[in-house]
Image (tube, rainbow, N blue to C red):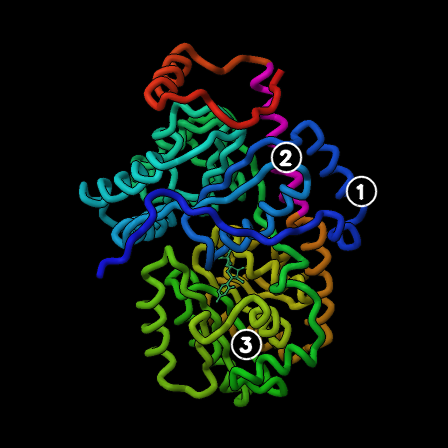
Amino acid sequence: MQEMRTPGMQHVVLTEKSLADYAPIVGDDVIAEIEQLARPLQGARVLNISSTAYGGGVAEMLHTLVPLMRSAGLNAEWRIITGPDEFFGVTKSMHNALQGMDLDLTPAMRAAYLHTNVDNAVYMEDEFDFVIVHDPQPAPLRMLRAADPGKWIWRCHIDLTAANQVYWNFLRPYIERYDAAIFTMPQYVKQDLAIGKVAIIPPAIDPLSPKNAPMDEARAADIVQLYGVDPTRPIIVQVSRFDPWKDPLGVIDVYRNIKTRYPDTQLVMVGSMATDDPEGMDYYQRTKEHAEGDPDIHLLSNLDGIGNVEVNAFQRAATVVLQKSLREGFGLTISEGLWKGKPVIGGNVGGIPIQIENGKTGYLVESIEECTARALELMRNPKKAQAMGARGREVVRRRFLSTAHIRSELQLFTELMKSSARTSRTTARTRVAQATLASMNGRKPRGQHIATA
Ligand code: UDP
């Protein structure tokens, strides 16, 4: 029997979070600033749209940012687009190509991509004051909902510096329909992108989520033991989807080098299978083959019962935390490791250098040999490692916690509101389109709209 699927987007159910709980960590002044920025935005309807509610950095962040925005008084929600496997196959290629891979973009791929977006656009209900669309998967929605009011923001989590030109040329017209775009770093903003506003906002982690909340050493040790890992022996940890850009095969090579000096070293690679990442299983298999049955290499995933608490435990139990990526939009796992007081060794790419200060809070590396040498250095000098980790935690406290992210998003909303007030952006064309759509649907625009005057 064929499974029935509800067409259109699915609502993500969220837990409640309170901004006040973050005051002891970030300080009262940060919370007060957020409250002040949120005051003119009370009741504003905010929709986040992404392609998965589980696995990967976007989902990780939205599980905190949306509840915190609600706590600030906005009417925020999160929906995910639905689509067939073929769509997610195409969008994974798109993700890879936008990070620099040389891939084809066939007419059939373009069609599959657009069909799913049309399906999701057709069934989209309600209207919003702000819509934040994450990454390329749902990017055409703005064009497909051109008559909708509200400010639409495209949030790019990808490193576009070496984007495949064919893919970028295909995507760009959809992005240019947005009122604003958010990038992690200025370097990611494409020169040929014509858009009203660009904001630079780095991603962030939640210090109170089960993944990052305090956990004592004994509990972390108990948890890793449940997975057959010995907490009394050195542990190298990388938490990452099984993906070529995360270089899991290179991580195994680093571990093998380390093992010649420290033979009792264990390697733990935690890699959940995200629902929008069909490549994950294949790359897991390749990694498993590369591990050649070594009993000290532990490849673990959500399928083994690894959840947020377990990731927390492994990051805390680690002797060395690695993020040996070859491309990385940001890499939340780095801030997660630093927040646990661990120096992190990361690939010198993308958003990693904005988190790791080389030699102070960890090391930036460009090869297996360099990564090995830095890991050995930290293993030989646990005191030095501890001091570096402590500095790293402070950097994360100041710059990469969810509260900083909320503050930046509220600033962007405020600026977009102000720019609307200065120049009425509604062109005659848009007004006609709005009226036509409303009459076709036999409805008046709904939802509460914040005053822009
Ligand atoms: N993650 C997880 N379990 C895993 C693998 C990853 O919970 O098995 C989380 C990880 O802790 C981080 C996010 O998924 O919060 C990955 O975000 P990142 O920015 O590092 O990479 P992305 O997957 O978005 O490329």
Which amino acid, mark 3? Ile
Q: Residue 11 in the image: state x and y as whole percent.
A: 46, 46
Which amino acid, mark 1? Asp
Q: Residue 169 in the image: state x and y as whole percent.
A: 31, 35
Q: Residue 381 in the image: state x and y as whole percent.
A: 68, 77
Sequence-wise first label, 3 or 2: 3
Whether residue 443 appears in this view of the structure is: yes
Residue at the image position 37 percent from the left and 13 percent from the top: 432
Which amino acid, mark 2? Leu
- In the picture of the structure, the residue carrying the numbered disc 2 is 410
Q: Is residue 125 above or below residue 84?
A: above
Q: Is residue 404 covered in magenta?
A: yes
- In the picture of the structure, the residue carrying the numbered disc 1 is 29
How many discs appear? 3
The front one of 269 and 134 is 134
Residue at the image position 64 percent from the left and 77 percent from the top: 220
- The stretch in magenta equals 403-421
Q: Is residue 39 above or below residue 255?
A: above
Whether residue 374 appears in this view of the structure is: no
Classified by dominant secondary structure, the portion drawn in magenta counts as helix
Task: State whether label 3 is within 8 Å of ligand 1.
Answer: no
Sequence-wise first label, 1 or 2: 1
- In the picture of the structure, the residue carrying the numbered disc 3 is 236
* Secondary structure beneath label 2: helix
Q: Quadrant of the N terminus?
A: bottom left
> For mark 1, does the 10 Å Cα neighbourhood hold few (<14), some (14 to 19), or many (20 or more) residues?
few
Residue at the image position 34 percent from the left and 16 percent from the top: 436
Quote the CA–CA distance across marks 1 and 3. 38 Å
Quote the CA–CA distance across marks 1 and 2. 16 Å
Quote the CA–CA distance across marks 3 and 2. 38 Å
Q: Quadrant of residue 253?
A: bottom left
Sequence-wise first label, 1 or 3: 1
